[in-house]
Amino acid sequence: MDILLQQLMQVQADFLLPFTRISAMMMVMVGIGVRTIPGPIKTAYAVAFTIMVMPVLPPSGFTNLFSLEMIFRVAQQIMIGSAIGFVSVIFLQIFVIAGQAIAMQSGLGFASMVDPTNGMSVPAVGQFFLILSTLLFWAIDGHIAMMQLVVQSFHLLPIGEGWMATGSYYDLAMFGGYMFSAALILSIAPLIAMLVINLSFGIMTRAAPQLNIFSIGFPFTMMSGLIVMWITMESFVFHFENSWEASLNMMCKVIGCNI
C-alpha cells in the first residue's frame, strides 16, 4: 500500500510541477496570455501540452506534495515560467512603444482605441503595430519556439535542483532597456522625417507670420505621417526579426542554455 501511494504521489508530482511552469509561461506569453482568451481555455492548453510532453521530461523525484518544500518548488516553477513568458511581452512592447512614438509625433495620437490586451486606450498606430507584430509572431511559429524552450528548461533547470542564475535577473531587467532602444531604432526614420516637416513649418511661420500655417499644418502633418509610415513599413520585418532573435537569446540566458 505504501509503495502504491508513493507511486501515485510521484505521478501527481511529475504532472503538477511541470504543469505549474508551463501554465505560468502560458499565462504571461504573447498571443496565449492575453485577456481576450478565457482562463479555462488557457488552462486546457497548459494541461494538454503538459500531458503531451510528460514522457520526455525528467522525473521530479519528489513525492512529498503536502509540505513546505512543495511550496518552494511551486514558486520555483512559477518564477522560471513567468520569466520566459515575460521576455516575449517585452518583445511585443517594442512595437507598441514605436507605434505610440510615431503617432504622437505625427499628430495621429488623437485617433485612439481600446487595447484588449492591456485594457486601456492607446493610439491607433500603436495598436496597428501590436496587431501586425502579433500576426508575425504566429506566422514565424514563435509560440512553438517558446514551447521548445520551456521543455528544454526542464533539462537545464531540473525541478527542485536548478534555480535561475543570479545574473539572469540582471539580464532580464536590462532587457527592458533594450525594449526602448529597439523601439527608438524602429521609429527613428519616421520621427526624423516628421521633425524635418515640423521644422519646415516653423521656418514658414517665421518667414511669413501673416500666413495661418497652423490651420493647414496639422492636417498636412497627419497626412505626411501616414505617408512616411507607409514608406518606412518595409523595414518592419527586418526590425521584427532582429528583436525576436534578441528575445530568443534572452530566453536562452534565462534558462542557461548555450546559444
Image: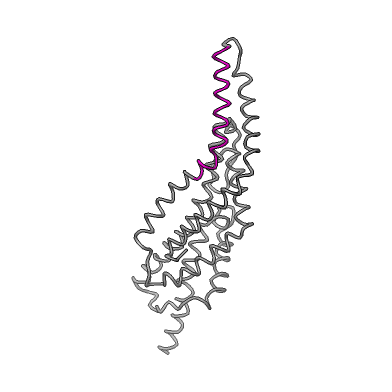
25 in magenta: no
Closer to us: 54 or 165: 165
Query: Which residues are drawn in magenta?
Result: 182-207
Closer to us: 114 or 149: 149
Task: Identify the coloring.
Answer: one colour
- In the image, residue 67 sits, relative to residue 179, either above or below, namely below
- Side (left or right) of 30 relative to 83: right
What residue is rendered at 58% in x and 20% in y? 201
Closer to us: 148 or 203: 203
The spot of residue 7 in percent (x, y) is: 45, 84
The spot of residue 189 in percent (x, y) is: 56, 37
Residue 68 occupies quadrant: bottom left
Q: Residue furthest top?
A: 210
The spot of residue 235 in percent (x, y) is: 61, 44
- In the image, residue 245 sits, relative to residue 70, either above or below, namely above
What residue is rendered at 54% in x and 54% in y? 244
186 in magenta: yes
- Side (left or right) of 166 relative to 150: left
Q: Give the position of the N terminus as an image quadrant.
A: bottom left
The secondary structure making up most of the magenta span is helix
